[in-house]
Amino acid sequence: MAEHSPFQSFFMAGFECSSHRRADGRRLDLLASTAHDRWAAEDYRAVAEQGLRTVRDGLRWHRVEAQAGCYDWSSVLPQLRAAREAGVQVIWDLCHYGWPDHLDIWRPAFVEAFARYAAAFARLLREEGETAPCLAPVNEISFWAWAGGDQGLFNPKTRGRGQELKHQLVRASIAAIDAIRAELRGARFVLADPLINVVARRPEQREAAEAHRQAQFEAWDLLSGRQWPGLGGRPEYLDILGLNYYPHNQWYLGGETLAVGDPAHRPLQGMLTEVHQRYGRPLLIAETGAEGPARAAWLERVADQVGRALRQGVPVQGICLYPVLDYPGWDDDRLCPTGLFGVADGAGRRALHQPLAEVLRRQREVLAGGTGR
Protein backbone atom coordinates (compact mmCIF):
# COMPACT_ATOMS: atom_id res chain seq x y z
CA MET A 1 0.00 0.00 0.00
CA ALA A 2 1.40 3.40 -1.02
CA GLU A 3 2.37 5.77 1.76
CA HIS A 4 0.07 8.76 2.09
CA SER A 5 1.71 11.94 0.86
CA PRO A 6 2.29 14.60 3.53
CA PHE A 7 2.08 17.39 0.97
CA GLN A 8 -0.84 19.73 0.31
CA SER A 9 -0.26 19.84 -3.46
CA PHE A 10 1.47 17.58 -5.96
CA PHE A 11 2.99 20.49 -7.87
CA MET A 12 5.05 22.79 -5.68
CA ALA A 13 6.90 26.10 -5.84
CA GLY A 14 10.55 26.40 -4.84
CA PHE A 15 12.00 29.72 -3.68
CA GLU A 16 15.75 29.92 -4.27
CA CYS A 17 17.31 30.45 -0.83
CA SER A 18 21.06 29.89 -1.31
CA SER A 19 23.17 31.84 1.17
CA HIS A 20 26.72 30.65 0.54
CA ARG A 21 29.95 32.54 0.05
CA ARG A 22 31.37 32.43 -3.45
CA ALA A 23 35.03 31.68 -4.12
CA ASP A 24 35.72 35.45 -4.05
CA GLY A 25 34.26 35.69 -0.52
CA ARG A 26 31.02 37.47 -1.41
CA ARG A 27 28.02 36.03 0.42
CA LEU A 28 24.92 35.47 -1.66
CA ASP A 29 21.41 35.88 -0.27
CA LEU A 30 18.89 34.81 -2.88
CA LEU A 31 15.86 35.44 -0.67
CA ALA A 32 16.92 39.08 -0.60
CA SER A 33 18.11 39.42 -4.21
CA THR A 34 14.80 38.02 -5.53
CA ALA A 35 12.93 40.23 -3.01
CA HIS A 36 11.05 37.18 -1.76
CA ASP A 37 11.93 38.10 1.81
CA ARG A 38 10.20 41.44 1.23
CA TRP A 39 7.20 40.11 -0.70
CA ALA A 40 6.70 36.67 0.86
CA ALA A 41 2.98 37.23 1.47
CA GLU A 42 2.39 38.31 -2.12
CA ASP A 43 4.51 35.45 -3.46
CA TYR A 44 2.69 32.80 -1.43
CA ARG A 45 -0.68 34.09 -2.57
CA ALA A 46 0.50 34.13 -6.19
CA VAL A 47 1.74 30.54 -6.19
CA ALA A 48 -1.34 29.34 -4.31
CA GLU A 49 -3.51 30.84 -7.05
CA GLN A 50 -1.67 28.60 -9.51
CA GLY A 51 -2.45 25.53 -7.41
CA LEU A 52 0.98 25.38 -5.76
CA ARG A 53 -0.02 25.05 -2.11
CA THR A 54 3.22 23.41 -0.97
CA VAL A 55 6.50 25.32 -1.35
CA ARG A 56 10.18 24.88 -0.65
CA ASP A 57 11.58 27.89 1.18
CA GLY A 58 14.48 28.45 3.49
CA LEU A 59 16.06 29.93 6.55
CA ARG A 60 19.25 31.98 6.39
CA TRP A 61 21.27 30.44 9.19
CA HIS A 62 23.89 33.17 8.98
CA ARG A 63 21.21 35.74 9.82
CA VAL A 64 19.37 33.68 12.42
CA GLU A 65 22.55 32.96 14.41
CA ALA A 66 24.82 35.89 13.63
CA GLN A 67 26.11 35.58 17.20
CA ALA A 68 26.90 32.14 18.56
CA GLY A 69 23.97 30.65 20.45
CA CYS A 70 21.70 33.69 19.94
CA TYR A 71 18.77 33.05 17.61
CA ASP A 72 17.10 35.99 15.91
CA TRP A 73 13.96 34.81 14.10
CA SER A 74 13.00 38.20 12.70
CA SER A 75 14.00 37.12 9.18
CA VAL A 76 11.92 33.93 9.46
CA LEU A 77 8.69 34.80 11.24
CA PRO A 78 7.26 37.02 8.46
CA GLN A 79 7.63 34.14 5.99
CA LEU A 80 6.26 31.57 8.42
CA ARG A 81 3.20 33.66 9.25
CA ALA A 82 2.61 34.78 5.66
CA ALA A 83 2.58 31.14 4.55
CA ARG A 84 0.05 30.27 7.22
CA GLU A 85 -2.11 33.23 6.19
CA ALA A 86 -2.01 32.10 2.53
CA GLY A 87 -2.77 28.47 3.41
CA VAL A 88 0.59 27.37 2.02
CA GLN A 89 2.62 24.48 3.44
CA VAL A 90 6.39 25.06 3.61
CA ILE A 91 9.24 22.56 3.33
CA TRP A 92 11.89 24.48 5.25
CA ASP A 93 15.53 24.30 4.14
CA LEU A 94 17.69 24.73 7.25
CA CYS A 95 21.05 24.98 5.49
CA HIS A 96 21.19 25.83 1.80
CA TYR A 97 24.98 26.01 1.38
CA GLY A 98 25.51 28.82 3.93
CA TRP A 99 26.40 28.95 7.62
CA PRO A 100 27.39 31.63 10.19
CA ASP A 101 30.88 33.08 9.93
CA HIS A 102 31.70 32.25 13.55
CA LEU A 103 31.62 28.49 12.81
CA ASP A 104 34.31 26.28 11.27
CA ILE A 105 32.53 23.70 9.11
CA TRP A 106 35.32 21.15 9.60
CA ARG A 107 35.06 21.00 13.39
CA PRO A 108 32.78 18.86 15.58
CA ALA A 109 31.37 22.12 16.98
CA PHE A 110 29.74 22.76 13.60
CA VAL A 111 27.63 19.61 13.93
CA GLU A 112 26.70 20.48 17.50
CA ALA A 113 25.76 24.06 16.57
CA PHE A 114 23.62 22.87 13.66
CA ALA A 115 21.72 20.49 15.93
CA ARG A 116 21.05 23.27 18.47
CA TYR A 117 19.85 25.61 15.71
CA ALA A 118 17.59 22.88 14.29
CA ALA A 119 16.11 22.19 17.73
CA ALA A 120 15.54 25.91 18.31
CA PHE A 121 13.67 26.20 15.01
CA ALA A 122 11.58 23.16 15.87
CA ARG A 123 10.58 24.84 19.13
CA LEU A 124 9.67 27.99 17.22
CA LEU A 125 7.51 25.97 14.83
CA ARG A 126 5.76 24.33 17.77
CA GLU A 127 5.12 27.71 19.37
CA GLU A 128 3.64 28.88 16.06
CA GLY A 129 1.26 25.92 16.01
CA GLU A 130 3.14 23.59 13.65
CA THR A 131 2.96 19.96 14.80
CA ALA A 132 4.01 18.04 11.68
CA PRO A 133 6.34 20.27 9.64
CA CYS A 134 8.46 19.13 6.73
CA LEU A 135 12.13 20.11 6.68
CA ALA A 136 15.20 19.66 4.49
CA PRO A 137 18.18 19.69 6.89
CA VAL A 138 21.15 20.11 4.49
CA ASN A 139 20.53 20.76 0.81
CA GLU A 140 22.40 18.69 -1.78
CA ILE A 141 25.10 17.07 0.34
CA SER A 142 26.70 15.43 -2.70
CA PHE A 143 26.75 18.55 -4.87
CA TRP A 144 27.99 20.71 -2.00
CA ALA A 145 30.77 18.23 -1.24
CA TRP A 146 31.86 18.33 -4.89
CA ALA A 147 31.50 22.08 -5.49
CA GLY A 148 32.75 23.30 -2.12
CA GLY A 149 35.03 20.46 -1.03
CA ASP A 150 36.61 19.24 -4.28
CA GLN A 151 36.37 22.10 -6.78
CA GLY A 152 36.65 25.20 -4.59
CA LEU A 153 33.73 26.86 -6.38
CA PHE A 154 32.16 28.15 -3.17
CA ASN A 155 32.47 27.72 0.58
CA PRO A 156 34.41 26.08 2.17
CA LYS A 157 36.46 26.71 -1.00
CA THR A 158 38.74 23.68 -0.77
CA ARG A 159 40.02 21.02 -3.16
CA GLY A 160 40.48 17.33 -2.53
CA ARG A 161 38.37 17.29 0.65
CA GLY A 162 34.99 16.45 -0.84
CA GLN A 163 34.61 13.11 0.92
CA GLU A 164 35.53 14.69 4.24
CA LEU A 165 32.96 17.44 3.71
CA LYS A 166 30.32 14.89 2.71
CA HIS A 167 30.87 12.98 5.94
CA GLN A 168 30.63 16.18 7.98
CA LEU A 169 27.37 17.21 6.30
CA VAL A 170 25.93 13.74 6.89
CA ARG A 171 26.83 14.00 10.59
CA ALA A 172 25.17 17.40 10.72
CA SER A 173 22.01 16.09 9.02
CA ILE A 174 21.73 13.16 11.43
CA ALA A 175 22.23 15.43 14.44
CA ALA A 176 19.60 17.87 13.16
CA ILE A 177 17.03 15.13 12.48
CA ASP A 178 17.52 13.73 15.97
CA ALA A 179 17.21 17.20 17.52
CA ILE A 180 14.02 18.01 15.59
CA ARG A 181 12.39 14.67 16.32
CA ALA A 182 13.04 15.22 20.03
CA GLU A 183 10.95 18.41 19.77
CA LEU A 184 8.40 17.42 17.10
CA ARG A 185 7.74 13.72 16.72
CA GLY A 186 5.57 14.33 13.67
CA ALA A 187 8.24 16.09 11.62
CA ARG A 188 9.02 14.80 8.12
CA PHE A 189 12.29 15.21 6.25
CA VAL A 190 13.28 15.68 2.62
CA LEU A 191 16.85 14.56 1.85
CA ALA A 192 17.63 16.25 -1.47
CA ASP A 193 20.46 15.55 -3.89
CA PRO A 194 20.90 15.72 -7.67
CA LEU A 195 19.65 12.83 -9.79
CA ILE A 196 22.25 12.26 -12.51
CA ASN A 197 23.35 10.00 -15.35
CA VAL A 198 26.95 9.78 -16.59
CA VAL A 199 27.77 7.95 -19.81
CA ALA A 200 31.06 6.75 -21.33
CA ARG A 201 31.97 7.56 -24.93
CA ARG A 202 34.59 4.79 -25.13
CA PRO A 203 34.65 1.28 -23.64
CA GLU A 204 37.67 2.07 -21.47
CA GLN A 205 35.67 4.86 -19.79
CA ARG A 206 32.74 2.71 -18.71
CA GLU A 207 34.05 1.84 -15.27
CA ALA A 208 34.90 5.46 -14.45
CA ALA A 209 31.55 6.73 -15.78
CA GLU A 210 29.63 4.21 -13.73
CA ALA A 211 31.65 5.05 -10.60
CA HIS A 212 30.78 8.70 -11.12
CA ARG A 213 27.10 7.82 -11.58
CA GLN A 214 27.03 5.62 -8.50
CA ALA A 215 28.47 8.47 -6.43
CA GLN A 216 25.05 10.15 -6.56
CA PHE A 217 23.84 7.59 -4.01
CA GLU A 218 26.63 8.10 -1.45
CA ALA A 219 24.94 10.65 0.80
CA TRP A 220 21.78 8.52 1.08
CA ASP A 221 23.90 5.42 1.66
CA LEU A 222 25.75 7.22 4.46
CA LEU A 223 22.56 8.55 6.03
CA SER A 224 21.03 5.07 6.00
CA GLY A 225 24.15 3.36 7.37
CA ARG A 226 24.81 1.33 4.21
CA GLN A 227 28.25 2.91 4.05
CA TRP A 228 30.45 4.08 6.92
CA PRO A 229 27.94 3.13 9.66
CA GLY A 230 30.32 4.70 12.17
CA LEU A 231 28.96 8.08 11.07
CA GLY A 232 25.72 7.12 12.80
CA GLY A 233 23.54 6.47 9.79
CA ARG A 234 20.45 4.27 10.13
CA PRO A 235 17.55 3.44 7.79
CA GLU A 236 15.17 5.67 9.74
CA TYR A 237 17.10 8.77 8.66
CA LEU A 238 15.89 8.22 5.08
CA ASP A 239 12.41 9.68 4.92
CA ILE A 240 11.44 11.33 1.62
CA LEU A 241 14.17 11.31 -1.01
CA GLY A 242 14.37 14.65 -2.82
CA LEU A 243 15.64 14.34 -6.40
CA ASN A 244 16.88 17.53 -8.05
CA TYR A 245 16.73 17.13 -11.82
CA TYR A 246 17.60 19.66 -14.53
CA PRO A 247 18.38 19.54 -18.28
CA HIS A 248 22.12 19.39 -17.52
CA ASN A 249 21.91 16.37 -15.14
CA GLN A 250 22.96 13.86 -17.78
CA TRP A 251 26.33 14.09 -19.51
CA TYR A 252 29.20 12.27 -21.17
CA LEU A 253 32.10 11.61 -18.82
CA GLY A 254 34.37 14.63 -19.06
CA GLY A 255 32.24 16.08 -21.84
CA GLU A 256 29.06 17.74 -22.93
CA THR A 257 25.49 17.47 -21.69
CA LEU A 258 23.37 14.65 -23.07
CA ALA A 259 20.52 16.10 -25.11
CA VAL A 260 17.10 14.53 -24.66
CA GLY A 261 17.20 13.10 -28.17
CA ASP A 262 20.61 11.47 -27.70
CA PRO A 263 20.39 7.63 -27.76
CA ALA A 264 22.42 7.56 -24.52
CA HIS A 265 19.95 9.85 -22.72
CA ARG A 266 18.17 7.89 -20.01
CA PRO A 267 14.41 8.32 -19.47
CA LEU A 268 13.61 9.92 -16.12
CA GLN A 269 11.08 7.16 -15.43
CA GLY A 270 13.86 4.57 -15.26
CA MET A 271 16.01 6.75 -13.02
CA LEU A 272 13.12 7.17 -10.59
CA THR A 273 12.45 3.44 -10.59
CA GLU A 274 16.10 2.71 -9.80
CA VAL A 275 16.14 5.04 -6.78
CA HIS A 276 12.92 3.58 -5.40
CA GLN A 277 14.09 0.01 -5.88
CA ARG A 278 17.35 0.82 -4.11
CA TYR A 279 15.83 2.49 -1.04
CA GLY A 280 12.11 1.69 -0.93
CA ARG A 281 11.30 5.26 0.12
CA PRO A 282 8.86 7.82 -1.33
CA LEU A 283 10.34 10.25 -3.82
CA LEU A 284 9.93 13.95 -4.54
CA ILE A 285 11.21 15.84 -7.57
CA ALA A 286 12.53 18.49 -5.19
CA GLU A 287 13.88 20.78 -7.91
CA THR A 288 13.31 20.94 -11.62
CA GLY A 289 13.17 23.65 -14.24
CA ALA A 290 14.72 25.07 -17.39
CA GLU A 291 15.64 28.53 -18.61
CA GLY A 292 13.96 30.85 -21.08
CA PRO A 293 11.64 29.42 -23.73
CA ALA A 294 12.54 25.84 -22.73
CA ARG A 295 10.61 26.12 -19.46
CA ALA A 296 7.22 24.84 -20.59
CA ALA A 297 8.50 21.94 -22.68
CA TRP A 298 10.80 20.82 -19.87
CA LEU A 299 7.98 20.67 -17.32
CA GLU A 300 5.82 18.81 -19.85
CA ARG A 301 8.59 16.23 -20.31
CA VAL A 302 9.29 15.80 -16.60
CA ALA A 303 5.60 15.51 -15.74
CA ASP A 304 5.08 12.92 -18.50
CA GLN A 305 7.95 10.79 -17.16
CA VAL A 306 6.72 11.13 -13.58
CA GLY A 307 3.26 10.05 -14.72
CA ARG A 308 4.76 6.95 -16.33
CA ALA A 309 6.64 6.16 -13.10
CA LEU A 310 3.47 6.60 -11.04
CA ARG A 311 1.59 4.19 -13.27
CA GLN A 312 4.35 1.65 -12.62
CA GLY A 313 3.89 2.03 -8.87
CA VAL A 314 6.82 4.33 -8.10
CA PRO A 315 5.69 6.59 -5.20
CA VAL A 316 6.57 10.05 -6.48
CA GLN A 317 4.85 12.50 -4.15
CA GLY A 318 5.37 15.73 -6.02
CA ILE A 319 7.17 17.95 -8.52
CA CYS A 320 8.69 21.24 -7.35
CA LEU A 321 9.22 24.04 -9.88
CA TYR A 322 12.59 25.46 -8.90
CA PRO A 323 13.25 28.30 -8.81
CA VAL A 324 9.69 29.53 -9.14
CA LEU A 325 10.97 33.14 -9.42
CA ASP A 326 13.41 34.55 -11.95
CA TYR A 327 16.65 35.22 -10.09
CA PRO A 328 20.08 36.84 -10.46
CA GLY A 329 22.81 34.35 -11.34
CA TRP A 330 25.21 33.27 -8.60
CA ASP A 331 28.35 34.25 -10.47
CA ASP A 332 27.44 37.24 -12.63
CA ASP A 333 24.08 38.59 -11.36
CA ARG A 334 22.56 38.16 -14.82
CA LEU A 335 18.81 37.68 -14.77
CA CYS A 336 18.03 33.97 -15.10
CA PRO A 337 14.52 33.59 -16.58
CA THR A 338 13.64 30.23 -15.06
CA GLY A 339 10.55 31.03 -13.04
CA LEU A 340 6.82 30.78 -13.25
CA PHE A 341 6.98 34.39 -12.06
CA GLY A 342 9.29 37.27 -12.94
CA VAL A 343 10.82 40.17 -11.03
CA ALA A 344 8.63 41.96 -8.48
CA ASP A 345 7.43 45.49 -9.13
CA GLY A 346 7.11 48.12 -6.42
CA ALA A 347 3.94 46.49 -5.07
CA GLY A 348 5.24 42.91 -5.08
CA ARG A 349 3.44 41.94 -8.29
CA ARG A 350 5.26 39.57 -10.64
CA ALA A 351 4.48 38.77 -14.27
CA LEU A 352 3.27 35.22 -14.88
CA HIS A 353 5.09 33.17 -17.55
CA GLN A 354 2.01 32.05 -19.45
CA PRO A 355 3.42 29.06 -21.41
CA LEU A 356 4.68 27.46 -18.19
CA ALA A 357 1.42 28.27 -16.41
CA GLU A 358 -0.55 26.54 -19.19
CA VAL A 359 1.51 23.36 -18.91
CA LEU A 360 1.16 23.45 -15.14
CA ARG A 361 -2.62 23.73 -15.34
CA ARG A 362 -2.84 20.86 -17.81
CA GLN A 363 -0.47 18.58 -15.91
CA ARG A 364 -2.24 19.23 -12.62
CA GLU A 365 -5.31 17.71 -14.22
CA VAL A 366 -3.37 14.78 -15.67
CA LEU A 367 -1.35 13.85 -12.57
CA ALA A 368 -3.71 14.86 -9.80
CA GLY A 369 -7.00 13.70 -11.30
CA GLY A 370 -8.42 17.21 -11.28
CA THR A 371 -8.51 17.33 -7.47
CA GLY A 372 -6.35 20.47 -7.22
CA ARG A 373 -3.58 18.55 -5.48
Image (spheres, grey):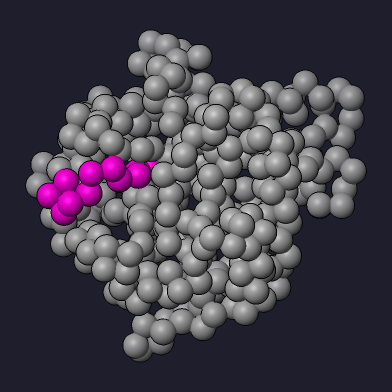
> For the view shown, which residue lies furthest in the left direction?
70
In the image, the segment drawn in magenta is 126-136
Q: In this picture, is 65 found above or below 197? A: below
Picture quarter with the N terminus: top right
Residue 364 falls within the magenta-colored stretch = no
Q: Residue 251's quadrant in the figure?
A: top right
Q: Is residue 159 visible?
A: no
In the rendered image, residue 157, in percent from the top left (x then y), is placed at 43, 42
Horizontal side, residue 154 vs residue 72: left or right: right
How many labels sit on residues?
Answer: 0
In the rendered image, residue 278, in percent from the top left (x then y), is placed at 61, 23
In depth, the one of 301 and 211 nearer the eye is 301
Q: In this picture, is 248 found above or below 362? A: above
Residue 127 falls within the magenta-colored stretch = yes
Q: In this picture, is 27 found above or below 130? A: below
In the rendered image, residue 32, in percent from the top left (x then y), is placed at 34, 68
Q: Residue at x 45, y 15 (%)?
A: 225
Horizontal side, residue 150 vs residue 81: left or right: right
> For the view shown, which residue lies furthest in the bottom direction?
346
Q: In this picture, is 336 found above or below 95? A: below
Horizontal side, residue 371 vs residue 139: left or right: right
Q: Residue at x 66, y 67 (%)?
A: 362
Q: Residue 135's quadrant in the figure?
A: top left
In the rendered image, residue 5, in percent from the top left (x then y), is placed at 46, 43
Q: Residue at x 38, y 10 (%)?
A: 230
Q: Residue at x 36, y 62 (%)?
A: 88
Horizontal side, residue 273 vs residue 111: left or right: right
Q: Is residue 13 visible?
A: yes
In depth, the one of 284 and 38 nearer the eye is 284
